[in-house]
Amino acid sequence: MSQHDHAHEDSAAIAHHHDIHSELPSDPALRVKALESLLTEKGLVDPATVDAWVETYESRIGPRNGAKVVAKAWVDPDYKRRLLSDATKAIGELDMLGNQGQHMVALVNTPEIHNLVVCTLCSCYPLPVLGLPPVWYKSAPYRSRAVLDPRGVLKEFGLELPEHVKIRVWDSTAEVRYLVVPERPAGTERLSEEQLAALVTRDSMIGVAKVKA
Amino acid sequence: MNSIHDMGGMHGLGAVRAEPNEPPFHEKWEGRAGGIVEVMTFPENFPGDRFRYLRETLRPDLYLTQSYYEQWLYVAEQILLEAGMISAEELRDGRAGPSAAKRNDAMRADAVWGFLHDRAHTGRKLAEGPRFAIGQRVRARNMQPDGHTRLPRYARGKTGIVTRHHGGHVLPDAHAHWQGPAPQHLYTVRFTARELWGEAANPRDRVNLDLWESYLEPA
Amino acid sequence: MNGVHDMGGMHGHGPIAPEQDEPLWHAPWEARMFGMRRGGTFPPGFNIDRWRHVRELIPPYLYLVRSYYDHWYMSYVAALLHSGMATREEIKSGHAAPGTAKRNDAMRPDQVWKTQKTGGVFARAIETPPLFAIGQRVRARNINPTGHTRVPRYVRGKVGVVQLHHGGHVLPDSNAHLQGEAPEHLYTVAFSMRELWGPEASPRDEALADLWESYLEPA
Amino acid sequence: MAASLSDHPHHHDHAHSDVPSDPALRTRTLESLLTEKGLVDPAAIDAWVEAYEKKIGPRRGAEVVARAWVDPAFKARLLSDATSAIETFGFLGREAQHIVVVENTPAIHNLIVCTLCSCYPWGLLGLPPRWYKAAPYRARSVIDPRGVLAEFGLALGEEVEVRVWDSTAEIRYLVLPERPAGTDDFSEAELAALVTRDAMIGVAKVEAPKEPNA
């Protein structure tokens, strides 16, 4: 059986199991509760491990990581150069690599080029530097139109770019993860790296917003 | 409009479930719904293409789950709401508002058979001749109108051969948006399955589409 | 697989409506589902490519209406059922069948941070040199596999310019179906908006996608 | 021709919620409202339903097919200008104004679909079956016609060319199936009785009779 036929059989077999959903309650809270109790009884999950994962992304991993990378790039030209030539290594220097963020590329916004990140196929997102993605990033409206009408999408975020700016939309179709380095806002010359990091928002590191002074 | 209705070439939509000696209407209401939408009074000069366009604006999940005639109800409601012939309150209550005047020009039963065999159609005489000839290689333009169009996504940018010319026909892309019939020459274009789907497709198979002149460019 | 998940370029999905100060979890069950996916035991050889493909196989109407972590629930359930690690009755009841032996190899809390730090490396060394160079014009091949692939429909058949080369990476089309990692050179290719969407698109903007060597051919 | 965005009904925010979810109730509600406003006459609805339940159906298309099988001159007219050839039958009209007949031969098998909605030759075949209007058929018939035909139990040889016709305009297609062997002494009416709706869509062949004149 050719690789193609095998894939076809395999997909059909998996899809068949999705028909269980007509026999399950629609409320996801009930279903997830039942799943956790089943997996615990079978020893397929340790609830304490579930807690640990939740806690990791609630308190240890989030957009503040990415903000630190951006602020450092703003104040340290040599770091910025390293970030541009090999973001994986440069972000690794700050110990901010990890699952869904092992192969990094930094996209520097300039007055002429504005970068925007999407995953049209699912929800790929640089978790170690930005934490978990917002719902809109994982939803059909953004996934469908970011590549087709980026200017229209940015308008819905209240960001209108002048005609002369070139927009580059990066569709995360592989395991490469993208971090937008927004433009440093004017009037922040005297701010410390920490103060600069505090200005950097999650949305500006996806590319749907600019950083305001 | 690149919405869920344009499903040519999609996978994952399940197996074809053909029902042996299937009745035209599975439940009584389906016949009533079909009948309402066919014989009701439409707004003045209502363009038929708009009916298809309004169905495309149905929310994607509803489009995939609601039955066919229920989607007709949605379209009929939109048409009458849009034209102000019914109000949202009237639709909700199923009762005419206090000031609503009753019309007496609805299609009568004895006119239905004639209506179903009426020969008004979308063909139009055109002054200038067709731009493309039978046998000519043409490419379906890579266009992404967010309004109504009859050029499916799977054929855009693909090259085929003109095999038939149907003369002038009303252009849905304009008609569906009250921009008049704007008739254009209509052609049947034949594409090889391999042009559409790559070399894994059967070498012998073909797909034919009826495409308006503005959809096409010389290849 | 040309599933409903491959939505780049679609209309009809409505406004984006970003939520201000959105919480990490919109309900406690979302957090539990997240933790189960990241900490739970999966069938032998299961991998992230297969996880994405199981999710793509969710029936389209459910895919469109169910929330994100509900997709995770449906995908984990399908993986468990497909591999025989759980039965439909167990999924429905939430209890292991009587007499089921309890495993003791589930991930422990003290392994979480290390897993988060080290997991998800997909780069692989490859002996063969890259077929394409930075700056070279390439075309995304017009392939329509029914199995898992990461070349979205909107770029297939389109010509772009290689921007980046990432070395060898695990090939999802093979890995998702447990046919081995089959690593290939991975490139980022830039497509002008006009190449993707036609002459009415912005003259300046472009969309880039990460594409494996087997997805590409010289243009 | 770019459509102005203003005329887009934003389907996300208008009355999805406050129409009855049960379609039967939703139908009754609309019918009673339109009747009260004089926008529809229930008797006309009855007439429409009866027309498609009893009078307009695949038997019409079968008559045209049988005539083409027995009358070569008619068949030639049918293949060159089906609309005028069918004129005399009185079948033209709603969803049957511009007809093209495509002939199946041992070398070519035709299959009709409407990937964008449900276009179908009502005047010749009546209202389309549910599977014709549903997503699985619309999605796959243009990309995997042989797979779809296999689901209808029809296996075609590699040497056969499958031609799929996507009804994207007002042109309505009818398949002229191959005449089955063993029907040489059949009357036109007996031939018509063999012709099924599915054969005229292209998802089936016309079966030869078990025994002649059975």
Image (tube, rainbow, N blue to C red):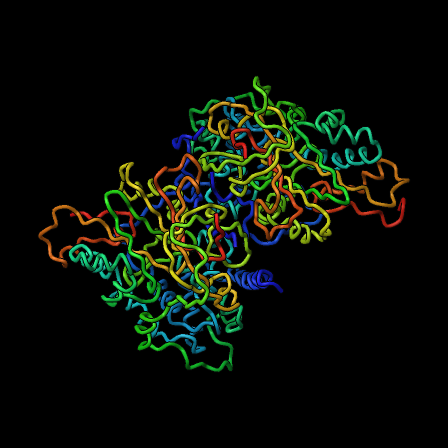
Q: Is residue B167 above or below residue C177?
A: above
Using the image, determine if residue D175 lies above or below residue D35. below
Instruction: Please say whether residue D170 is visible from this viewpoint.
Output: yes
User: Based on the displayed image, in which of its 4 quarters is residue A97 positioned?
Assistant: bottom left
Residue A140 location in percent, x, y? 41, 49
Query: Which residue, as the protein is rendered here, is positioned at the far left?
Result: A190
Q: Position of residue B51 (x, y in %)?
A: 52, 32
**Near-viewer residue (B123 or C77):** B123
Can you give x and y, in whole percent of width and height, for residue A59 in the image?
24, 66
The residue at 72%/33% (across/down) is D55
Does residue C93 appear to the left or right of C27 in the view shown?
right
Residue lying at 30% horizontally and 63% vertically, measured from the top left? A88
The answer to whether residue D35 is seen in the rendering is no
Q: Position of residue D97 (x, y in %)?
A: 65, 27
Left or right, C170 with respect to D38, comes to left
Q: Which quarter of the image is occupied by the C terminus of chain B?
A: top right
Residue D3 sits in quarter: top left
